[in-house]
Image: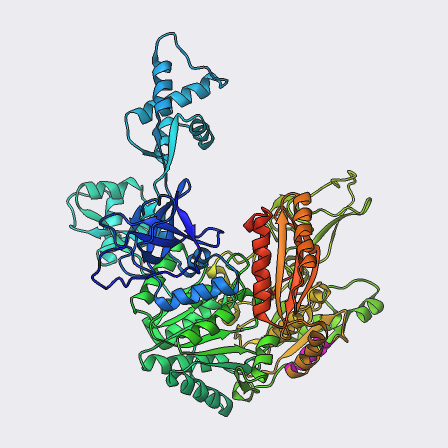
C-alpha cells in the first residue's frame, strides 16, 4: 500500500541533470481529493524527475501524477513500485511548481488536483481496463465442463452461458482488454463486475501513456494505373487535380462507392498514409490590422508605461482602465510585439471562449506562427499539441481562457488579463483558483509585468490601484474621437400603465429598431436569459415544474420542444398536464432569448435576424459564423445573452437594446449591483464603434437604481464610490477577505447534520478577527442532487482566514465528514 506524506515535510530533492545514483523513493502528487503526496519505490532502471509525470498504482487503478521529490527515506509500510516514468524531462519547471504550491496553499486545494489543472495533457494518457481468469474461475470452468455437473447459481441459463463464454475466452489468454473481451464474449459490464465480485476473474488497470499526435489519412497517387472503370477514373482525376495528394475524407465525399478507393490501394495505384494534422489558430475572415491606426496620446502613454515595465525585468502591476472602444486591445498587441522583439514571451487571457478566435486572429495577423491558443473548446489532442508547441519554444505569444495562465512559456515578460472583472476567470471546481490573481502571482514570480484591463474593473482591482498596489492608467476617450453612445432609460412600470399590458419590447425600442433598419444600420438586443420561457406554472394549483435534481424551475425550449434545467442539464418532455393536480391549464411565464427572437421576427418580418446564445452556439464555428454574418452585413439584428456583450467590435451596430436589464439586481448576492453595472456598461459599448454615433435603449423596472443610473451616464468612478460605501459598512471585499464554505450531501439529514457540526465548532472556538455567517440554506438549496448549506466567512486578515479554514477542514476530517462534501471557496465570486 502506498503511503501518504504531508507536502510540508522537508524533502531532499535531486536535479535530473546531476550524475548521481537514483534515489530509492519518490513522492508523487496525484489528482485525488486528499491533501497529501504519496511515496512510491523507484524500480531499477527507472529515472523519474522532479516536475515530471509518473504512472503509479493507486488503490485499484493506475494514475498519472507529478513527482515532487526524490529521496531515500523509507516509509513505515511497504511502498508500491512506480509502473512507468512518462517524462525524461520535467513538464513543470520549478517556477510553475512553486506557483502550483502557492495555489494549493492559498485556495486550500490538493496539490495533485492543482497540477492536473495546470497540465492539459490528458490525451497522452490512455485509460484502459483488462481482465484475467482467477483460480476460482478455473475451478468454475472445470466444473461447468464436466458432464453432469453444474455450478450452483441463481442466474438464468443465458447468464450462466455468458459467464462460461467469458471464462472459456480468458482461459486461453493472459490479460484481455475490456473492449476485446466484451466483443468476443458478447457480455455487459455489469456481468463482468458480478464475476469480479465472485472472484472468478480479476480486473486490472492497464492505463498507460500514448502518442497524442493528431493524424489524418491522406491518399497519394503513385501511378496513373492501367485499365480503370468510371468510378476509379473519378478518384484518380480528383487526386491528380489536387496535385496527387488529398485527404481520404475528401475522396469519400465523392459520389463513388467507398470500396473503389480500397481497390486502387490493393492495385498499388494509390497509397494511404497517416500525416500529422496542422492546427488552425483561427478561422476568422480577413480582418483589418488591429494596429492600423494612429494611437492617441493616452494610448501612447499607456504603451510606453507597459513597455518600460516589461523591459525593466522587475515585477509591477498595472490596471488599464479604458472606456469601451478606447483601443485597449491595440495597446495589448503593441506591447506584446515589443516584448517579442526582445525575444521574450507574453500571455493574453480573455474571459470567454467565444472571444478567443477573434483575439487569436488579431494576434496571428501581427505575430504569425508565434501564436498558440489554449482553451477548453479544443480537443484533448489539440490542447496537448498547443502546449508542446509552447514548451518547445515554437510559440512565444499565447492567448486563451483562464487555463492559459499556466502556459509553459520561457522568459515570461508580460501577462495581460483582458476584462479582468469577469467572473469566468474563477474556476468552479477544485482547484477553485481565480486566474486574474494567479496571473498576478505568476508575474511576480517571473519578475514580469501584469496588466489588468477593463472598461469596468472589479472593485477590488480599482481599490488596489487607488491604494497604489497597481499603477492606474486611464484611456478616457474612444479611438478616433468617436463618441460614447447616448443611453435612454425606459421605465417599464410606466410602459405597463400606459399600454395596459406587460410588454417585452417597449414602444420606444420598437421605434428605434425600425429607424435603424430603415437606414440599413445594424442592431443588437440583449436579454440575459436563454430559452423560450423560464417558468412552467399550473394555473389551477400554482405548482411550477422543477428539475428533479435541483431546486430550480425548468426552462421551456420551444425549438427542441423540451424542458431543460440550465444548471445540471436534465431534460424532460414539455408538460401537457400538471404533475401535481393533473390540470391541463399549464401556463408558460416569462421570456427568454428564443422567445425574444420570435417576437422580433413578428415585428420586423423583413429583417434578417440571428440569435447568439448557448442553444445556437455548439462550437467556435457557430460563434464565428454569427459574428462574421453581422460583420459582413448579412444580419440586420442580433439577439443574444451576455455572449454578445463583451469584446466584439462590430462597426455597423448603431443601436443596442437591453431587455430585462435589472434581472440580476434581485439576486441575494452582494455583487449583484456591480454585475448589473458591468453588464450594462459592456453591452452599451457595442454601439457606435464605427463612424455613425450609437444609442442604447435600456428597459428597466428600477430606473432609479444607482447601478442603472451610473451605467447610463458611463460613470464608473461614481458607481465605484457609491458601491464602496456599502461594502465598507457591511465588511465585504475589498475591505475584507471572504470565503464561502459549502456543505453538501445527496441526503438532506446528512447535509443538516454536518453543517450543524461545523456550526457548533465555529461557535465553540473563538476566532479573533473572523466574522462567520451561517449555517444557512444556500440560495439554491438543492443542486445536481445535492442539498446545500453554507457559511460565509469574512476577515480583514487573509492569514487568519486561511488558518481558520484549515482548522475547520481538520475538524471536519476528525468528524468523518468526507473531504469532497465540504467545499471551501476562497475569494468566492458566486454565493448562490
Q: Position of residue 700 (x, y in %)?
A: 74, 70
Residue plotted at (59% across, 84% down)? 466
Can you say which quadrant of the picture contains the C terminus? bottom right
How many numbered marks does the figure carry? 0
Task: Name the foreground residue: 822 vs 375.
Answer: 822
Left/right of residue 817 with respect to residue 294 in the rendered view: right
Q: Which residues are magenta?
A: 706-716
- Is residue 224 within the magenta segment? no
Q: Is residue 287 visible?
A: no
Q: How is the image coloured?
A: rainbow
The furthest residue to the top: 148
Left/right of residue 615 with respect to residue 395 in the rendered view: right
Q: Main structural element of the magenta stretch: helix, strand or loop?
A: helix
Q: Is residue 752 visible?
A: yes
Q: Quadrant of residue 410?
A: bottom left
Residue plotted at (36% across, 81% down)? 339
Left/right of residue 465 with respect to residue 347 in the rendered view: right
- Is residue 713 within the magenta segment? yes
Task: Name the foreground residue: 743 vs 272.
Answer: 743
The furthest residue to the bottom: 297
Can you say which quadrant of the picture contains the N terminus? top left
Q: Position of residue 396 (x, y in %)?
A: 34, 72
Q: Position of residue 711 (x, y in %)?
A: 67, 78
Q: Is residue 5 above or below residue 161?
A: below
Left/right of residue 363 with respect to residue 717 in the rendered view: left
Task: Name the foreground residue: 252 vs 109.
Answer: 109
Q: Position of residue 20 (x, y in %)?
A: 22, 60
Q: Is residue 465 above or below residue 383?
A: below
Amino acid at each position: 500500500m502506498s503511503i501518504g506524506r504531508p507536502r510540508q515535510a522537508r524533502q531532499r530533492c535531486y536535479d535530473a541533470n546531476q550524475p548521481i545514483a537514483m534515489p530509492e523513493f519518490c513522492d508523487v502528487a496525484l489528482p485525488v481529493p486528499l491533501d497529501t503526496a504519496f511515496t512510491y519505490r523507484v524500480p531499477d532502471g527507472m529515472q523519474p524527475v522532479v516536475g515530471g509525470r509518473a504512472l503509479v498504482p493507486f488503490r485499484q487503478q493506475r494514475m498519472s501524477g507529478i513527482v515532487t521529490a526524490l529521496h531515500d527515506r523509507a516509509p513505515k509500510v511497504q511502498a508500491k513500485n512506480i509502473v512507468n516514468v512518462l517524462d525524461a524531462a520535467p513538464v513543470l519547471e520549478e517556477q510553475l511548481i512553486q506557483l502550483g504550491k502557492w495555489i494549493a496553499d492559498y485556495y486550500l486545494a490538493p496539490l495533485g488536483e492543482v497540477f492536473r489543472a495546470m497540465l492539459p495533457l490528458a490525451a497522452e494518457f490512455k485509460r484502459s481496463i483488462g481482465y484475467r481468469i482467477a483460480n476460482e474461475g478455473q475451478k468454475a470452468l472445470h466444473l461447468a465442463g464436466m458432464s453432469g455437473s453444474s455450478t450452483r447459481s441463481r442466474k438464468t441459463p443465458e447468464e450462466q452461458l455468458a459467464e462460461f463464454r467469458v471464462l472459456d475466452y480468458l482461459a486461453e489468454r493472459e490479460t484481455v482488454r475490456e473492449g476485446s473481451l466484451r466483443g468476443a464474449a458478447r457480455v455487459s459490464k455489469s456481468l463482468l463486475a458480478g464475476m469480479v465480485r465472485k472472484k472468478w476473474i480479476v480486473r486490472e488497470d492497464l492505463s498507460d501513456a500514448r502518442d497524442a499526435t493528431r493524424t489524418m489519412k491522406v491518399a497519394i497517387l503513385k501511378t496513373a494505373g492501367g485499365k480503370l472503370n468510371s468510378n476509379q477514373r473519378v478518384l484518380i482525376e480528383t487526386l491528380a487535380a489536387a496535385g496527387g495528394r488529398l485527404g481520404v475524407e475528401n475522396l469519400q465525399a465523392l459520389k463513388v462507392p467507398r470500396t473503389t478507393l480500397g481497390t486502387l490501394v490493393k492495385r498499388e495505384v494509390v497509397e494511404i498514409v497517416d500525416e500529422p494534422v496542422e492546427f488552425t489558430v483561427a478561422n476568422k475572415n480577413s480582418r483589418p490590422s488591429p494596429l492600423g491606426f494612429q494611437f492617441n496620446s493616452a494610448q501612447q502613454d499607456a504603451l510606453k508605461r507597459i513597455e518600460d515595465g516589461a523591459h525593466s525585468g522587475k515585477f509591477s502591476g498595472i490596471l488599464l482602465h479604458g472606456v469601451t472602444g478606447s483601443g485597449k486591445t491595440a495597446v495589448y498587441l503593441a506591447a506584446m510585439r515589443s516584448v517579442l522583439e526582445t525575444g521574450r514571451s507574453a500571455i493574453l487571457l480573455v474571459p470567454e471562449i467565444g472571444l478567443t478566435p477573434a483575439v487569436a486572429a488579431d494576434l496571428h495577423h501581427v505575430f504569425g506562427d508565434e501564436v498558440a491558443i489554449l482553451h477548453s473548446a479544443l480537443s484533448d489532442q489539440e490542447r496537448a499539441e498547443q502546449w508542446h508547441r509552447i514548451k518547445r519554444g515554437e510559440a512565444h505569444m499565447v492567448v486563451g481562457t483562464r487555463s492559459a495562465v499556466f502556459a509553459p512559456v520561457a522568459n515570461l515578460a508580460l501577462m495581460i488579463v483582458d476584462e479582468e472583472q469577469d467572473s469566468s476567470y474563477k474556476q468552479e471546481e477544485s482547484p477553485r483558483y481565480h486566474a486574474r490573481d494567479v496571473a498576478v502571482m505568476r508575474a511576480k514570480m517571473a519578475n514580469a509585468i501584469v496588466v489588468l484591463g477593463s472598461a469596468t474593473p472589479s472593485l477590488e482591482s480599482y481599490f488596489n490601484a487607488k491604494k497604489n498596489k497597481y499603477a492606474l492608467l486611464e484611456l478616457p476617450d474612444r479611438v478616433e474621437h468617436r463618441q460614447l453612445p447616448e443611453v435612454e432609460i425606459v421605465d417599464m412600470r410606466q410602459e405597463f400603465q400606459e399600454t395596459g399590458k406587460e410588454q417585452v419590447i417597449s414602444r420606444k425600442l420598437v421605434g428605434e429598431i425600425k429607424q435603424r433598419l430603415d437606414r440599413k444600420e445594424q442592431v443588437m438586443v440583449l436579454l440575459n436569459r436563454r430559452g423560450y420561457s423560464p417558468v412552467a406554472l399550473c394555473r389551477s394549483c400554482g405548482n411550477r415544474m422543477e428539475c428533479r435534481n435541483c431546486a430550480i424551475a425548468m426552462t421551456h425550449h420551444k425549438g427542441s420542444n423540451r424542458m431543460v434545467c440550465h444548471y445540471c442539464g436534465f431534460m424532460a418532455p414539455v408538460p401537457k398536464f400538471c404533475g401535481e393536480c393533473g390540470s391541463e391549464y399549464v401556463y408558460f411565464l416569462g421570456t427568454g432569448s428564443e422567445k425574444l427572437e420570435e417576437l422580433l421576427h413578428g415585428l420586423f418580418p423583413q429583417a434578417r435576424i440571428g440569435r447568439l446564445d448557448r442553444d445556437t452556439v455548439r462550437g467556435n464555428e457557430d460563434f464565428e459564423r454569427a459574428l462574421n454574418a453581422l460583420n459582413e452585413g448579412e444580419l440586420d439584428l442580433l439577439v443574444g445573452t451576455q455572449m454578445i456583450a463583451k469584446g466584439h467590435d462590430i462597426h455597423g451596430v448603431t443601436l443596442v437594446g437591453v431587455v430585462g436589464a435589472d434581472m440580476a439586481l434581485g439576486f441575494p448576492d452582494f455583487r449583484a449591483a456591480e454585475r448589473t453595472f458591468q453588464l450594462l456598461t459592456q453591452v452599451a459599448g457595442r454601439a457606435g464603434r464605427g463612424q455613425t454615433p450609437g444609442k442604447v435603449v435600456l428597459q428597466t423596472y428600477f430606473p432609479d437604481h444607482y447601478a442603472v443610473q451610473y451605467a447610463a451616464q458611463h460613470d464608473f468612478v461614481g458607481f465605484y464610490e457609491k458601491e464602496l460605501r456599502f461594502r465598507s459598512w457591511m465588511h465585504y471585499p475589498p475591505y475584507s477577505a471572504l470565503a464561502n464554505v459549502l456543505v453538501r450531501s445527496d441526503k438532506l439529514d446528512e447535509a443538516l447534520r454536518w453543517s450543524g457540526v461545523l456550526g457548533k465548532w465555529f461557535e465553540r472556538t473563538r476566532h479573533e478577527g473572523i466574522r462567520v455567517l451561517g449555517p444557512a440554506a444556500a440560495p439554491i438549496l438543492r443542486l445536481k442532487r445535492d442539498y446545500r448549506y453554507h457559511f460565509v466567512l469574512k476577515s480583514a486578515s487573509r492569514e487568519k482566514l486561511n488558518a481558520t479554514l484549515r482548522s475547520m477542514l481538520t475538524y471536519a476530517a476528525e468528524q468523518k465528514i468526507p473531504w469532497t462534501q465540504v467545499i471551501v471557496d476562497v475569494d468566492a465570486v458566486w454565493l448562490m
